[in-house]
Image (spheres, rainbow, N blue to C red):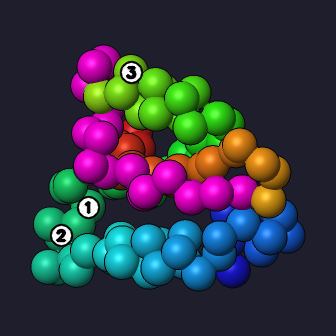
Amino acid sequence: MTQVQKFVKNQKFAQSELQQYLDSENLNTPILNQTSANQLPKREPIKHLLIGSPKAVTSTIHYLQVIGYASIGDWSPLLPTANPGEVMSILIHQILMQ
């Protein structure tokens, strides 16, 4: 179980919806052979979790699109948290590792 999944479970968020989003992400890419794998840059997933008011989360998602980091459609739907008026959204983004 990942740290995000543990956090969601412990906070009693809408775990089934978040789990459904996480399960739909296919982060495993096949390696053709050892030689070509050593020549390709290594990519690693990083998970971003935004928690706040719907306005603050949506605004941050739009800002990250404006600066070219992630598209709006890459984020999970806004999911309610255990706190009234608070939502969360998650993004799994692949980054290059040097």
Q: Which residue lies furthest to the front in this view?
A: 84
Instruction: Count residues near mark 3 (Cα–Cα under 10 Å), then give few for <14, some for 14-19, many for 20+.
Output: some
- In this orientation, which residue lies closer to the viewer: 25 or 97? 25
Residue 42, image quadrant: bottom left
Q: Is residue 6 visible?
A: no
Give the residues in magenta: 66-81
- Is the residue under label 1 in contact with that under label 2 (CB below 8 Å)? yes
Q: What element carries label 3?
A: helix
| Badge number at residue 72 | none
Locate residue 86, reporting x and y percent: 70, 44
The residue wearing badge 3 is 63
Residue 39 location in percent, x, y?
19, 55
| Identity of the residue furthest to the right in this view | 10
Mark 2 Cα shell of 10 Å, populated few (<14), some (14-19), many (≥20): few
Q: Quadrant of the N terminus?
A: bottom right
Question: Which amino acid, by three-letter code, is at mark 1?
Answer: Asn
Can you tell which quarter of the image residue 18 is in?
bottom right
Mark 3 vs mark 1: in front:
3
Q: Mark 2 points at which residue?
A: 35
Q: Distance between the residues labelled 3 and 1?
A: 35 Å
Residue visible at 50% across and 52% down in the picture: 78
Query: As shown in the figure, which amino acid type bears the numbered disc 2?
Result: Thr
Residue 80 lies in the magenta stretch? yes
Q: Where is residue 34 in the image (x, y as percent from the top left)?
A: 23, 75
Of the pair 31 and 66, the residue shown nearer to us: 66
Q: Distance between the residues labelled 2 and 3?
A: 39 Å
Across and down, in percent, residue 14 comes to 65, 70
Find residue 38 and name its label.
Answer: 1
Relative to 54, 70 lies left or right: left
Mark 1 burial class by Cα count in 10 Å: few <14, some 14-19, many 20+: few
Q: Which residue is drawn at 26% across and 61% down?
A: 38
